[in-house]
Amino acid sequence: MTTRRLNVDNSEQFIGLFGFREENIPLFRDELGVEIFANAGEVTITGPAEKVDLAVMTLEKLREIILRGEAVDRTRIRYAIELASEGKADRIGEIMRDVIAITYRGRPVKCKTLGQKQYIDTIKKNTCTFAVGPAGTGKTYLAIAMAVVAFKNKEIEKIILTRPAVEAGEKLGFLPGDLAQKVDPYLRPLYDALHEMLGVEAYQRLVERQAIEVAPLAYMRGRTLNDAFIILDEAQNTTSEQMKMFLTRMGMGSRMVITGDVTQIDLPGGKKSGLTEAIEVLRNVPDIGIVNLSHKDVVRHELVQNIVRAYEKYASVKEQNAANARSGRFLRTDPTHRR
């Protein structure tokens, strides 16, 4: 057993690491497999030598983030520990370092995970980017942030955001109002992100000038979109024909970002998703980037990360059982079953 001590006599740093009531200490203990005790600004870490070294390195890197003025929540702590456990402790400092954009209220938008950083770098390097990952990984929000930055820098003249209007349990025909009112709920997440980045009044002015367009995917047919930053959200719900139609709308001076979650396909009749097919077809095409985000990149409540991880595990087991069944090696778990 090894024991090491750290001095964290700055109260703001101490609270930033361990919480107001030291509620984060059990998290460090459980995730790092060490004993941690804090007393009067001195932190004592005891356990196997390798785990103690890992804990010290993680705490020091998290303290560097706090010294930059960033808040460290439980999700970021878990993520930092995962990076350290994977031998990437030196990259913990990259979390929330670079400012991507500034909201209209002056809040900086930053990458909170290495996956998000890779996503932003891919958008910068490629004309067309595919981002696939679970809910809460910032796919849509970061794409809109990049679109707003490009617009403010006069790199493009228009922002176009679109989604397929595919029902997830509720039919469009049963919703009240005309077509615009029927599809509005499907576009609401895009409105929310734009409002946060630009403010409601600025957003409305840009819509009136036709500098911003938010519309269902069907409205893209037959158009050529020049000098635009085009975002297709919820792309897992496109058909093959819709995806091809969308990708071929790109005009001169335009950039595209396509986002989706292949675990939430709502297409009827078991149709193949246009997103999964496009990734297969375009994987090796130059100037097209593909980024895969995972539960590690979820930046919502830490419970969302656990939910996504549980579903990933469930899907993996289900897929393995299906493979075993096809090969005749399926093992039934029902103890009453008789062959």
Image (tube, rainbow, N blue to C red):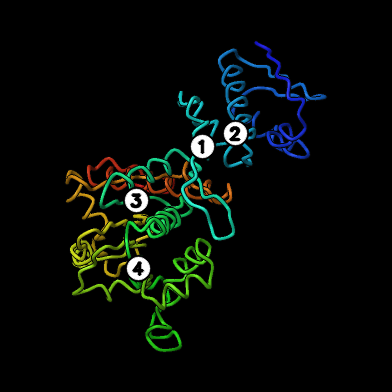
**Disc 4, disc 2: CB below 8 Å?**
no
Cα–Cα gap, marks 4 and 1: 30 Å
Dot 1 corresponds to which residue?
95
Cα–Cα gap, marks 4 and 3: 15 Å
Of all residues shown, which one is farthest toward the top?
A: 1
Dot 2 corresponds to which residue?
65
**Disc 1, disc 2: CB below 8 Å?**
yes
Dot 4 corresponds to which residue?
163
| Relative to 271, residue 78 above or below | above
Of all residues shown, which one is farthest toward the bottom?
A: 177
> On the rendered structure, is 254 left or right of 103?
left
**Disc 4, disc 1: CB below 8 Å?**
no
Dot 3 corresponds to which residue?
131
Cα–Cα gap, marks 4 and 2: 36 Å
Amino acid carrying mark 4 in the image: Arg
**Residue at 46% in and 88% down:** 176
Residue 287 image point, x, y percent: 21, 46
Residue 302 image point, x, y percent: 58, 47
Residue in the foreground of this view, choosing between 73 and 286: 286
Mark with earlier residue (1, 2): 2
Amino acid carrying mark 3 in the image: Ala
Mark with earlier residue (2, 3): 2
**Disc 2, disc 3: CB below 8 Å?**
no
Mark with earlier residue (3, 1): 1
Q: For mark 4, does the 10 Å Cα neighbourhood hold few (<14), some (14 to 19), or many (20 or more) residues?
A: many
**Residue at 50% in and 46% down:** 110
**Residue at 44% in and 89% down:** 177
Residue 156 image-quadrant placement: bottom left
Residue 11 image-quadrant placement: top right
